[in-house]
Image: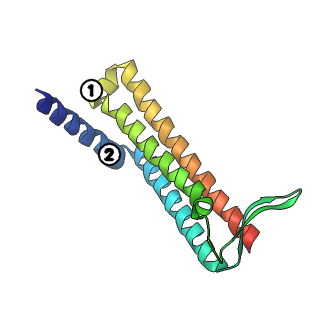
Amino acid sequence: MKKKQFLLFKQGIKQASQTVFKEDKQLIFLTWGALLFNLVAWLGLFLLVRSVGETMLIISYNSFLGIDRMLDLKGEVSWVEVYIVPLMATGLLFFNWLLALFLIHQTTKEQLERSVTARVNWLGAQLVLMGGLVVQLATVIFVLALWKVNS
């Protein structure tokens, strides 16, 4: 009995993920847009660390007081401090995807047309993915600000 329930759950998740990643145009845009921004943030930060070389990397800059925090890339470097923002954004992105899959898994196409709860779940999935896209955009802006400060 448990194996049958697990197989039904697995089939539902597969159907929900196909809906998120392949069928609904709004969900496709939000999902792949967030993934693209995430990859741009990682690539930008990687290229920034590589271009700075073994000098000081400015992590935090205050326009009123100036430089707040710098990292010396010559010796022992706490790489967590360098990559914490895109790492948290990636974690939030995966959490948002799982939450959207959960919300869509609870609905089917037939329920979407006649059930208010299904439409609320669909809207919730869209809002969660929109929030993920905004977080990824903010991460790209953060990396661009680091580029500006360190150039």
**With 30 as the anchor, is 138 left or right in this view?**
right
Residue 99 on image: x %, y %: 41, 36
Q: How many marks?
A: 2
Q: Residue furthest front?
A: 76
Three-letter residue code for mark 2? Glu
Image point 39% across, 41% down: which residue?
98
**With 82 as the anchor, is 34 left or right in this view?**
left
Towards the viewer: 70 or 147 = 70
- The residue where tag 2 is placed is 23
Image point 41% across, 28% down: which residue?
121
**With 47 as the anchor, is 97 left or right in this view?**
left
Q: Is residue 40 above or below residue 13?
A: below
Residue 90 on image: x %, y %: 49, 52
Q: Is residue 119 above or below residue 33?
A: above
- The residue where tag 1 is placed is 110
Towards the viewer: 53 or 40 = 53
Q: How is the image coloured?
A: rainbow
Q: Quadrant of residue 100?
A: top left
Q: Residues within 10 Å of mark 2 (few under 14, many from 20)?
A: few
